[in-house]
Amino acid sequence: MSQAPILISSRDNPLLKELRRLAQDSTAYRKTGRFWVEGDHLCRAALQRGRQPSIAVFAESVWPVFAAEFGAAAVKTLLVPDALFDSISGLESPSRLGFVFDLPAGAVLQAGLASVILDRVQDAGNVGSILRSAAAFGFQQVIAMKGTAALWAPKVLRAGMGAHFALRLVESVEPATLDGLHVPIIVTSSHQGELIHRQTLPWPCAWALGHEGQGVGAELMSRAALSVRIAQPGGEESLNVAAAAAICLHASVIAIS
């Protein structure tokens, strides 16, 4: 049950110090077991997926605007002065509304799910965009190999636009763990493999997407059931990994529709 809002006005409050780390440090969630989302879009997306925040934080100026919709959403509700909220936020233009959630429990690889494998994809924007495509096209699980950007980092959450709450996310996976996935792995390359639009794509499957510069690593490549490439008649050297992901995942949807 939610409680009456608690007003905090001290910058040195221990809880606010933790929130500041969650909002500004990409891997702080791994130590605390909880993560921060900011803005009404992400907060609403989480609630729509049945996620309950442990803490809701409002700047005093927006509390009258959001109280009716979000005031009872969390177990604990905090009100802080606007300037103090701005010091927590990692955004240039803070939205002055944020939720803290506990990380999902038991985030281990599940066999048989349509999945996306991220092999050392390092740009937070790319990772978030790929998560959006995965959720949009009916993939259920995203598996991040070691070296991939932190999936619950604030920048990835913002780029994912709520997709995190529709997916099973598994981090820091070693190549050997993928042997328990039990669905065919498809790898993409700019210059190798068969053209994707000429292939009969398996379903469910796991699309493997590699490092922005180096592509999919050898250990993952050796586990692939199929290697494909995207036709590029314009002659560009390669596609951005997030753009390539959207094309590949959509191709799977077309194949089963």
Image (spheres, helix red, strand yellow):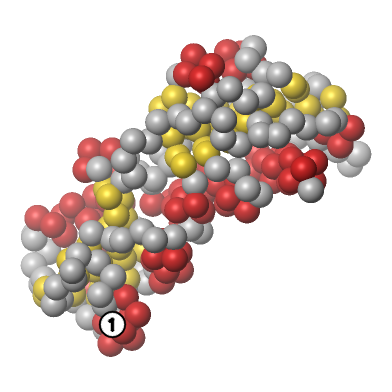
Q: Position of residue 173 (x, y in %)?
A: 44, 24
Residue 143 visible at all: yes
Residue 130 visible at all: no
Q: Residue at x 13, y 77 (%)?
A: 4
Disc 1 crowd, CA 10 A, few/some/many (<14, 14-19, 20+): few
Q: Nearer the viewer, residue 254 or 95?
A: 254
Q: Position of residue 56 (x, y in %)?
A: 25, 67
Q: Quadrant of residue 58?
A: bottom left
Considering only vertical position in the picture, is 177 above or below 249?
above
Q: Is residue 155 left or right of residue 131?
A: left
Q: Amino acid at mark 1?
A: Ala
Q: Which quadrant of the rendered structure holds the N terminus?
A: bottom left
Q: Position of residue 136 (x, y in %)?
A: 62, 53
The secondary element bearing badge 1 is classed as helix
Q: Position of residue 33 (x, y in %)?
A: 25, 43
Circle count: 1
Q: Which residue is mark 1?
A: 67
